[in-house]
Amino acid sequence: MWITALMLSFATVATAAPDQNAVEPTEGEERAVLTDAPTVPPPITRKHATKVVVRLEVVETEMTVAEGVRYSFWTFGGKVPGKFIRIREGDLVEFHLDNHPDNKMPHNIDLHAVTGPGGGAASSLSAPGHSSVFSFKALNPGLYVYHCATAPVAMHVANGMYGLILVEPRDGLPKVDREYYVMQGDLYTKGPNGQPGLQPFSMLKAIDERPEYVVFNGAVGAIAGDKALQARIGETVRLYFGVGGPNLTSSFHVIGEIFDRVWPEGNTSVVSHNVQTTMVPAGGAAIIDFKVEVPGTYILVDHSLTRAFNKGALGMLKVEGGDNKIVYSGKISDEVYQPEGSRIRVTDLPPQPARPALTRKQLLDRGRSVYTTNCAACHQANGQGIPKAFPPLARSDYLNADKVRAIRTVTGGLQGSVTVNGEKYNGVMPAWTLSDEDVAAVLTYVYGSWGNSGKEVSAQEVKTHRAKGSAKASE
Amino acid sequence: MKTAGALIAVTAAAIALASGTAAGGAAAPEDMALVPAGPPAAFFVPGGSGVPAAGADRGASADVPAFLIDRRPVTRRQFAEFLRRRPEWSRSRVAAVLADAHYLEDWASDFDAGARVPPDAPVTRVSWFAANAYCQWRGKELPTVDQWERAAAGDGKDTAATRDRILRWYSQPATEPLGVVGRGAPNAYGVYDLHGLIWEWTLDFNSTLISTDSRDPGGKDDPLFCGSGSLGAVDPSDYATFMRYALRNSLRASYTTSRLGFRCAAEPDRP
């Protein structure tokens, strides 16, 4: 008795037993509101079960994975992840899976929220141009993954065929100010990370579980920059976070936040408090709540960090509002710290195959991509830098005066006092281990942007003027 | 090479006509290729239980007897001729049970394929019934799954490259108009376009019951259900082939899709 009472006190949400949901009568009928990530359909306010009609269309479509990199995605509703479906426990769902006539592949759907063989898969296999219907009663509340289960299932999932279905407990979840939908997936492209063009699926990399990309919401940067999630201070944000996989488990973390509440495994009956990183398995989900107190940008990552910093598993939540110096002071001082030994980071990179010369447009695109990845964090996307910390690259006298110095700065780093546009800066820029081609591209991009001189920098010049002692990044 | 091969085939056909060569001889009309008798390119383990290693012995099924198969898929031009001769298969006259609502919907009219797609592109959006009727009209029949897979496997020397090509094809959304048949290189048997252009109907497309749920281990109800998941497959890493079986399994005989066409086969002594 005592144990039961204790357990009940941990449960924050009242739910009915599956048996009860199986027989709960439904009243009325409605069409499900479906949304693309990161949007979530509105909470369910009705206090009874109903019949919900869900129409989900499978669309095969070419989309961007990363700048200049295209991929042929198979989708539930045209985007990755698939449409968010929101129902209530006890609901009777009439599910229509429509396979678009322009598609090439057969598809079906397995919803983890379904009780029954295959989760609907066996009842929903649809040839291109055909539509299947089945129905299920939502017996268990929770946040569930759905995905295509047609052979070969791993390829269908790798190509983007996953999404989330929320079965709300009968009394709903605690009210919050913002709800967002984020899903992680791993992508296996034939070409290495960053190789431009339409990339076919690599069966071998998938089987070896060696993804080239690990992304939130289907693409590198899908929820970053001007597509970042938004909130204001004082608000409570809820993330419906799922992992489509097909293979990798996520160590989901938001840098600078502590999750006030997590319903791990998408299980609405048990809540954890004060969580730093929550592990979400492939084919699993979690509901994550946290209140934002301090303005700024919070970075969503898979804390298996090379995935975040090399493969794309990185998103942003931008929080606006006035400073709260008590909760967080911001930087109080910053002085140059100079340890013993080399200040240059040396990494051996594998030799890169020779590529054909790029057109100016390709060079600029590549340069923008290199800039976004390596430079924008300090010098900012608009080249304005940050006053007193990082000098501007826009209309920069220091930059425009000397091309060779610019090459040496990027390849060898820079430390100490410099004057840029009349302002003094005393900081450290590390040496970048970029290939000749990438340095040429990024400098050409910088020189070609924001009112700079428009100089072009060739890979040959970079090779000639590369700072001594810096890493040899390419053959 | 190609010309020489064709010449030999024509010569052989002439000899066959003259001497009435028995089945299994090298007789082939110019537009068909002879695939010699040999083991089927089995994808699923017969009676499948247990997990075979990748590249494991492909089973002990009976050999597929020698057969002839069209070198190229049936084109829109060829199908238009069939429709003029057999107007009951035209779009407006075909019975609904024999072809779904998308049947030939990309054609300009009943007998005119239109100019948007080249006339020598493969005909698609045809049902199994229509494909079957076409082949019979030509005195042929649809290839069986075993025949088709055996022809498609070629001499087995470039399996990895072929799979790569197929996966690349899967990566291209089906929004571009189809190209004409016979453009790429033929395979070891002199057959074109088995991969990378369209899916193709087979006579017994629904005889292998791959489960609609790719992870279903199966094996309890019916040996054929072992086709269901990777447990029954000879090579579970062969994603390209899985997809072909899954597509076949999603079809019914009245279905049509924008990337599903066909070619015909025949016995060697009855070209």
Image: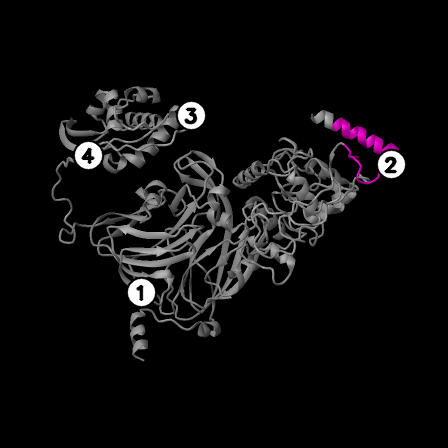
**Magenta highlight on residue B16:** yes
The 10 Å Cα crowd at callout 1, few under 14, some 14 to 19, many 20 or more, is some
The amino acid marked with disc number 1 is: Val
For label 2, the residue is B20
Q: Nearer the viewer, mark 4 or mark 1?
A: 1
**Magenta highlight on residue A119:** no
Instruction: Give me the chain letter of mark 2.
Output: B
Report helix, strand or loop for mark 3: loop
Q: In the image, which disc is placed on residue A271?
A: 1
Task: Give left or right: position of A316 versus B31.
Answer: left
The 10 Å Cα crowd at callout 2, few under 14, some 14 to 19, many 20 or more, is few
Q: CA distance from mark 2 to mark 3?
A: 60 Å
First in sequence: mark 4 vs mark 1: 1
On the image, the x and y values in percent for residue A278 come to 32, 56
Quarter of the figure that contains the N terminus of chain A? bottom left
For label 4, the residue is A390
For label 3, the residue is A354
The amino acid marked with disc number 2 is: Gly
On the image, the x and y values in percent for residue A351 come to 39, 29
Q: Nearer the viewer, mark 2 or mark 1?
A: 2
Please state which of residues A221 and B210 is positioned toward the viewer in this rendering. B210
Q: CA distance from mark 4 to mark 3?
A: 34 Å
Give the extent of the magenta segment. Answer: B6-29
Q: Are marks 4 and 3 in contact (CB under 8 Å)?
A: no
Tell me the colour scheme of the image.
one colour
The amino acid marked with disc number 4 is: Phe
Instruction: Give me the chain letter of mark 1.
Output: A
